[in-house]
Amino acid sequence: MQRIEPLEIPEDALREMIYNSLVHKLYVGVPIQMWVFNDHIELWNEGKLPDAITIDTLVEKHSSHPRNQLVASVFYKAGFIESWGRGIRKINEAFDKAGLERPVFKESEGGLLVTFGRNYPTMKDAVSNIQSDDGINDGINDGINFTQTEKLILKAISANKNITYVDLMNDLSISEATVTRAFRNFKTNGLIIRQGANKKGYWQITEKGKNVIS
């Protein structure tokens, strides 16, 4: 009845990241995108940093350059934004307080990509000694086996990031159901991520995916 369950990600930090995405979003571009994996989360927002701001200065005290001033004003008056130019510091402080590694900020594909881990200490301890047949041992996805066909599909994606379902079906002589099932498995286990919009985007192999086909 009195148990307090700690969240795997500091709630205030996650909320602050989403607020920042909304305030600084390039609204003529593609939607804000979030990818949730077993061990980490990636949040991407289109729009380059202002000329006066770099990744290094983001974590320090700096002036605010909201891309959407009206949205920023509403958030400020509503109490969602406490002070200008302090959002990234608040995020890092929340992660420090929770004993977690700070998020990694990176300029990517004409936008800002934030990558931060998910806290799975119990699960990691429980499976830390399990080794999969593919040589992957990241504590969460150990023991996951991929078929030879799935590995061939992953290699084809690695060779051509713009490859389509139809291309895979024709090149590998497999059914659409097989391709669909493989992609679902890849995304669930964090082997691939989608960069950009559906029509103009492409598939990116993660480090975990590269380990599977190495």
Image (cartoon, helix red, strand yellow):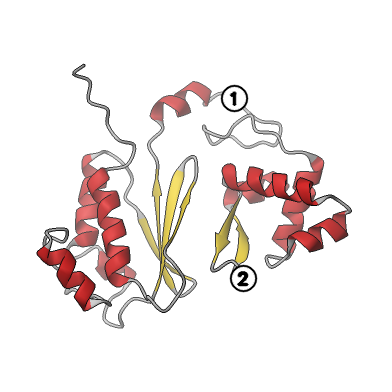
Contact between marks 2 and 1 (CB within 8 A): the answer is no
Task: Residue at 57% x, 34% y: name it.
Answer: 141
Q: Where does the N terminus fall, quadrant-wise?
A: top left
Q: Position of residue 204 (x, y in %)?
A: 60, 60
Q: Position of residue 203 (x, y in %)?
A: 63, 61
The disc labelled 2 sits on which kind of residue? Lys
Q: Secondary structure at mark 2?
A: loop
Q: Position of residue 145 (x, y in %)?
A: 70, 34
Query: Does 210 sit left or right of 110 as displayed?
Result: right
Q: Specify few, some or many for label 2: CA neighbours under 10 Å numbering under 14, 14-19, or 20 or more.
A: few
Between marks 2 and 1 in the image, the one whose residue lies nearer the viewer: 2
For the image, the number of numbered tags is: 2
Task: Residue at 38% x, 50% y: name it.
Answer: 116
Closer to the N terminus: mark 2 or mark 1? Answer: 1
Q: Secondary structure at mark 1?
A: loop
Between residue 5 and residue 211, name the one nearer to us.
Answer: 5
Query: Does 101 sit left or right of 153 as displayed?
Result: left
Q: From where the camera sits, is residue 62 visible?
A: no
Residue 82 occupies quadrant = bottom left
Q: Which residue is mark 2?
A: 199
Q: From where the camera sits, is residue 131 visible?
A: yes
The disc labelled 1 sits on which kind of residue? Ile
Task: Residue at 40% x, 45% y: name it.
Answer: 117
Q: Residue furthest bottom?
A: 51
Q: Specify few, some or many for label 1: CA neighbours under 10 Å numbering under 14, 14-19, or 20 or more.
A: some
**Picture disc at residue 130:** 1
